[in-house]
Amino acid sequence: MHNWTWQTWQGQPYLTCDLIAQPHGFFTSAFAPQLPEVLTSALSKNAEVLRTKQVHGNVVLAPEAVRTGTKTLVASGSSQVSDEDIERPHADGCFSSKAGQATWVCTADCTPALIADERTGQVAAAHAGWRGTAQKIVPTAIAKLQAQGSQLQDLRVLLGPAIAGEVYQVGEDVATQMGLSVVDGEQFANPADIVAHLLTVDSPPLLPDNKPGHVRLDVRRINEMQLEQMGLASDQVATAPHCTFQEPERFFSYRRTKLKQVQWSGIISV
């Protein structure tokens, strides 16, 4: 088991895990409304901040694509540029290509995934909600690192605080879309059979729910299964023992409050 530890910056807590050596943190709601441009200072003296406009897809961008896709919409006569004045490329992840680059994602109940290469020092961050997970965004981010020289055995993945399966009720249609990312749909006669199968596997990603046509969905477990199927060993992946929905004192949860509030998670290449 890997140790998850609370660190402190500016008197507030953020979470780290000893699986990954690169500077990283899953920041709590206490840091709102601070943005990565400020939060990076908690992890490194000066690193380039890379972040995107998240859209629940599976696009993961290189630093140059983040840079060239980011445009400042300067209001006439305004000397102050706010974060709303910056137009960022639509993507749900980014990765580093050299040392000193900070990759960031924001989440409320979705899974923030931070990926590190022990050998090259490179990193990636991905926003894995159910839609992104159904489209295998974390394996996509890993493939980007592999394309620039990472070996699977050198990679380490942290799945941060997110809504836990026991409290995340979804329709069976959502459960089926998620299931198709980890099973061969042609092996099953209909969607209900996929759901039934995933309710009975070891460490199931689906749990029963009292409401007809619904189940409970563990998004992080689906991500773990995708990583297992890619060939990552269980000791290369660590999942945070924290639920955004059940810990209101630490985390924002869209499912709990219906408010658009986020916490940030980031990791820096070395």
Image: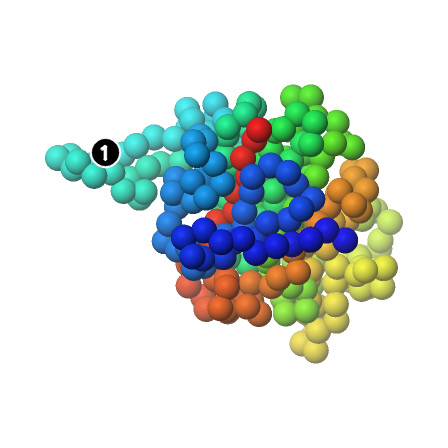
Name the outermost residue toward the bottom. Answer: 210
Q: Where is 137 relative to 261, above or below?
A: above
Query: What's the residue at 56%, 39% (across, down)?
Result: 23
Percent position (x, y) of residue 69?
A: 42, 28
Percent position (x, y) of residue 244?
A: 56, 63
Percent position (x, y) of residue 196?
A: 82, 63
Query: What's the residue at 25%, 38% (across, down)?
Result: 81
Left or right, residue 201 beside residue 222: right
Q: Where is 258 relative to 61, above or below?
A: below
Q: Label 1, on which residue? A: 74
Query: What's the residue at 35%, 36% (across, down)?
Result: 87
Q: Amino acid at mark 1?
A: Val
Q: Secondary structure at mark 1?
A: loop
Query: What's the residue at 54%, 25% (across, down)?
Result: 99
Left or right, residue 236 beside residue 252: right
* Residue 53, quarter of picture: top left
Front residue of 19/102: it is 19
Left or right, residue 34 beside residue 101: left
Residue 146 in view here: no
